[in-house]
Image: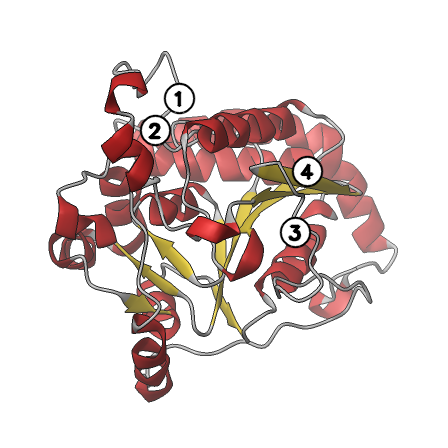
Amino acid sequence: MALRHFRSLRPMLAAVHQSKTSGQTIKASFVSGKSYSTATTGEDTGTGQTVVSERKGSVVTVAINRPEVRNAVNQETARRLLEELKAFDNDSDLNVAVLHGKGGNFCAGYDLKELANHTATLKLEQDVTKGPGPMGPSRLQLSKPLIAAVSGFAVAGGLELALLADLRVVEESAVMGVFCRRFGVPLIDGGTVRLPRLIGLSRALDLILTGRPVGAQEALAYGLANRVVPDGQALQAALELAEQISSFPQQCLRADRSSATYSCYDAPSFTQAMQYEFDRGIPVIQSEAVSGATRFTTGAGRGGKFF
């Protein structure tokens, strides 16, 4: 869960980011000719809706739309996020989703004002197999890729939402961290489960126990960020990445993704992980691999070219 944050940290962290020597800053490439931006100027914030979505071919964007509280999530927002991501997973016309926040911040976590003032109405499903997490979709195991476009703060429960994604595209001045450590608000949306898997137990405990802020370059060095892009370009870069992923043969891509996730979280042994991989790969050979091999023999993709 979560927290609202402090504007005064941003200049300090920007200076820290510039001094980091580890990792690599990757500039967004604009190959599609389309223009998407997380900038606040002239942005349609979807007035009155806490979550807004937009379809772009086989890609859908899902945006948290509470910029006045740095996109902190309340019960209504959690419900809407769950609805949108479940709808994405069930829609055969969609291949990839991009999760982001309106107004310059990804998500500052759970709305602590709601937690403090409306405790009696806060209903949490204790059985993780029977209902949503406090942040909404955090208990989902999606069958298709989700990319987080991270700007501003992605902290506490907002960090947990970012961890739900397969990939995180992070802006240079973004701040990640377990800021809820200061107020005794626990990580109950997968933070203690996904973070150690992504970056290792030692680094995860450093962030979990101290609650300290993490800049984009450190996140990149840890593997918490997959791409670092200039400010204002996370959504653009995430959409281009989503379009590339969506262009690949999808049955094969999803089989490999499913196997990687199973081996990381669910496989009881190496042998069973290998069996799971083989069982899901075999059907793909007839459905996609044979036709792909035929295209290769005609010259497609030679020399490592992507098409």
Which mark is nearer the camera, 4 or 1? 1
* Residues at marks 4 and 1 touching, judged by CB atoms closer than 8 Å: no
Nearest to N terminus: mark 2 or mark 4: 4
Q: Amino acid at mark 1?
A: Pro
Q: Nearer the viewer, residue 232 or 197?
A: 232
Point out residue 116 in the picture as x, y percentages from the top left corner: 23, 34
**Residue 132, labelled with which disc?**
1
Rendered residue at 30%/82% (across/down): 16
Q: What residue is pinned by disc 2?
A: 134
Q: Residues within 10 Å of mark 4 (few under 14, many from 20)?
A: many
Which mark is nearer the camera, 2 or 4? 2
Q: CA distance from mark 2 to mark 3?
A: 27 Å
**Residue 98, labelled with which disc?**
none
Q: Nearer the viewer, residue 104 or 227?
A: 104
Q: What residue is pinned by disc 3?
A: 242
Q: Is disc 1 placed on a helix, strand or loop? A: loop
Q: Can residue 123 be seen from the camera position used here? A: no
Q: Amino acid at mark 3?
A: Ala
Q: Amino acid at mark 4?
A: Asn
